[in-house]
Image (cartoon, coloured by chain):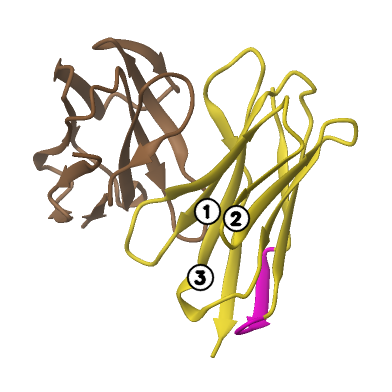
Chain colours: A yellow, B brown
Amino acid sequence: GENVEQHPSTLSVQEGDSAVIKCTYSDSASNYFPWYKQELGKGPQLIIDIRSNVGEKKDQRIAVTLNKTAKHFSLHITETQPEDSAVYFCAANGGGSYIPTFGRGTSLIVHP
Amino acid sequence: DTEVTQTPKHLVMGMTNKKSLKCEQHMGHRAMYWYKQKAKKPPELMFVYSYEKLSINESVPSRFSPECPNSSLLNLHLHALQPEDSALYLCASSPDREGYTFGSGTRLTVV
């Protein structure tokens, strides 16, 4: 089955800085890579996703990059704001399964 | 309507109680899911319903019983739970195999 590793587990930045969260996956057949943001007391929210036929995708201050050869993908947040503080989960859908395997999560803290 | 609504938001139950968690979506999504999430951990899949039929049961104990009365509703019936079952229970839906919409969850405490 699929295995997803996520780093770092905690990331602390100053407001305005950039933040990068990295994930690796094991199943070369995986073809869909979503990122979820979970704020305290809420369920995870899909913030951006990328498919295996695309190398990069941007949406305002967030971007995701995918390197299929190396089997890793990353979330980039620019100009961080305190409201970006949350736990971020990466996930990968294995080629043979539509059920995502989640990474262990990154707690992002943005200091004003 | 782009939301998944879960009720109740909080639930405290004794080990001999029977209770139900409810989930509703009106986005026309054909797949619905129950997840369990412990503090500081990723969500763990429990059940998947596809077109109102149970398609995946991740070896969940029988004290958890899912039900899908129609394409918009998903229930999770709870009976004789243990304290270690205390967690955040999340419902999610998706139009196909991608892009989950999660509810805000039910915070369950078993005493």
Q: CA distance from mark 1 to mark 2?
A: 7 Å
Graded by Cα atoms within 10 Å as few (under 14), some (14 to 19) or many (20 or more), the crowding at tag 1 reads: some
Question: Which chain letter matches label 3?
Answer: A
| Residue beneath disc 1 | B41
For label 2, the SS is: loop
Q: CA distance from mark 3 to mark 1?
A: 19 Å
Circles 2 and 3 in contact, beta carbons < 8 Å: no
The residue at the point 32 percent across, 43 percent down is B90
| Residue beneath disc 3 | A84
Point out the stretch of residues depicted in magenta. A9-16
- The nearer-to-camera label among 3 and 1 is 3
- The answer to whether residue B110 is above or below residue A79 is above
Residue lying furthest front: A60
Image quarter where the C terminus of chain A lies is: bottom right
Amino acid type of the residue tagged 2 in the rendering: Gly
Residue A50 figure quarter: top right
Question: Which chain letter matches label 2?
Answer: A
Amino acid type of the residue tagged 1 in the rendering: Lys
Q: Residue A61 location in percent, x, y? A: 59, 63
- The answer to whether residue A102 is above or below residue B12 is above
- The answer to whether residue B72 is above or below residue B7 is above
Amino acid type of the residue tagged 3 in the rendering: Asp
Q: Residue B85 location in percent, x, y? A: 33, 46
| Residue beneath disc 2 | A105
Q: Magenta part mainly helix, strand or loop?
A: strand
For label 3, the SS is: helix
Circles 1 and 2 in contact, beta carbons < 8 Å: yes
Looking at the rendered structure, whether the residues under marks 2 and 3 are on a common chain is answered as yes
One can see residue A34 in this view: no
Question: Which chain letter matches label 1?
Answer: B
Is residue B84 in the magenta section? no
